[in-house]
């Protein structure tokens, strides 16, 4: 398994669960100094990502990009895949497509989290789910031309009613090619009855981990019992990233260093 840490470049997302903020190159440099394999980027748009890494290619840093988030489509533009308006759904798909394109240039998958949307007065649950499945099918297919997967993230009940658990996520992506699940330990702690069992159930459809403690702080700063979860990841042969999507608390450096310590401890058990 490999280590990663998040950086948000989206001002509107301030206060959200990201370790580094505002300056991707500075985040990259600090992450590398601490020993991370990669950074995960939450960008405002695809152009920002391109601009950043054209100027100073990642290879110069000896670092990778673990994944690229699409949440700015929701946070900045209020675009989501289950919107009642077909035009908005199309714009959501177009936005995510641009992120898939730029992520692929860095060899990274794109994440669909908050852009999945939810049901509303105008869109019942079944319809919302069908809209989302249509979007995932189109976008998974789009990513396949680059050999990257698309990551779909079940979120806790306060953020979506599409899929809250790994089991519901598996059901939602069933029959859709080139889409894997992102298992976020913060959401899992709220929704799963047994996190390890859910990971085993997810098996080879688990493509990425958001490595967070119960309170969404760095692993070790909450009360999650980590060893059985890592054991479950070993059992399914998971060799992807444990990526710290946690609050910058008490500050970015402390959160990143604690994450690295927890990563080493997790892998040594
Ligand atoms: C949101 O709670 C989350 O976990 C993000 O990864 C979704 O974009
Ligand atoms: Mn997450």
Image (cartoon, helix red, strand yellow):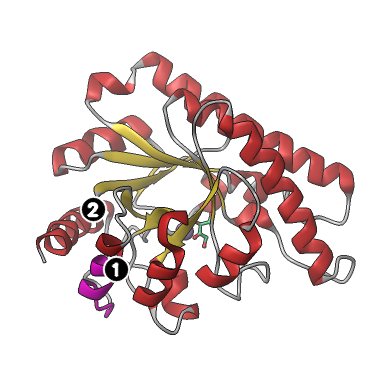
Residue 14 painted magenta: no
User: Could you tell which of marks 2 and 1 lies nearer the N-terminus?
Assistant: 1
Residue positioned most to the bottom = 193
Q: Which residues are magenta?
A: 223-232
Residue visible at 15% across and 59% down? 267
40 lies left or right of 265? right
Taking the spot 29% from the left edge, 49% from the top edge, the residue there is: 239
Q: Against 58, is 248 above or below? A: below
**x and y percent of residue 231 in the render?**
23, 68
Disc 1 crowd rating (10 Å Cα; few below 14, some 14-19, many 20+) is: some
Question: Residue at left 49%, top 22%?
Answer: 50
From what the image shows, is residue 255 above or below residue 33?
Answer: below
Decide if residue 85 is on the left or right side of residue 133. right
**231 within the magenta span:** yes
In this rendering, the answer to whether 8 lies above or below 200 is: above
Q: Quadrant of residue 158?
A: bottom right
- Local packing at callout 2 (Cα closer than 10 Å; few below 14, some 14-19, many 20+) is many
Name the image quarter holding residue 216: bottom left
- What residue is shown at x 86% (from left), y 65% (from top)? 123
Q: Nearer the viewer, residue 243 or 32?
A: 243
Q: Which residue is mark 2?
A: 256
Quarter placement of the C terminus: bottom left
């Amino acid at each position: 398994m490999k280590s990663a840490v998040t950086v948000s470049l989206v001002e509107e997302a301030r206060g959200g669960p990201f370790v580094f903020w505002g300056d991707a190159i500075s985040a990259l440099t600090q992450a590398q100094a601490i020993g991370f394999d990669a950074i995960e980027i939450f960008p405002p748009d695809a152009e920002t990502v391109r601009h950043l890494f054209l100027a100073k290619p990642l290879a110069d840093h000896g670092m990778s990009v673990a994944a690229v988030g699409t949440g700015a489509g929701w946070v900045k533009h209020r675009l989501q895949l289950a919107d009642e308006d077909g035009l908005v759904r199309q714009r959501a798909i177009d936005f995510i497509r641009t992120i898939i394109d730029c992520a692929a240039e860095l060899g990274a998958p794109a994440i669909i989290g908050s852009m999945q949307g939810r049901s509303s007065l105008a869109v019942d649950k079944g319809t919302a789910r069908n809209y989302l499945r249509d979007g995932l099918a189109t976008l998974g297919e789009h990513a396949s031309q680059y050999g990257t997967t698309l990551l779909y993230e079940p979120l806790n009940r306060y953020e979506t009613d599409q899929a809250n658990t790994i089991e519901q996520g598996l059901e939602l992506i069933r029959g859709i090619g080139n889409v894997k699940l992102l298992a976020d330990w913060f959401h899992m702690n709220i929704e799963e009855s047994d996190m390890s069992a859910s990971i085993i159930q997810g098996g080879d459809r688990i493509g990425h981990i958001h490595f967070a403690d119960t309170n969404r702080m760095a692993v070790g700063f909450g009360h999650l019992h980590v060893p059985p979860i890592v054991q479950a990841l070993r059992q399914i042969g998971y060799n992807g990233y444990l990526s710290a999507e946690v609050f910058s608390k008490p500050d970015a450096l402390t959160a990143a260093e604690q994450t690295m310590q927890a990563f080493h401890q997790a892998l040594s058990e």
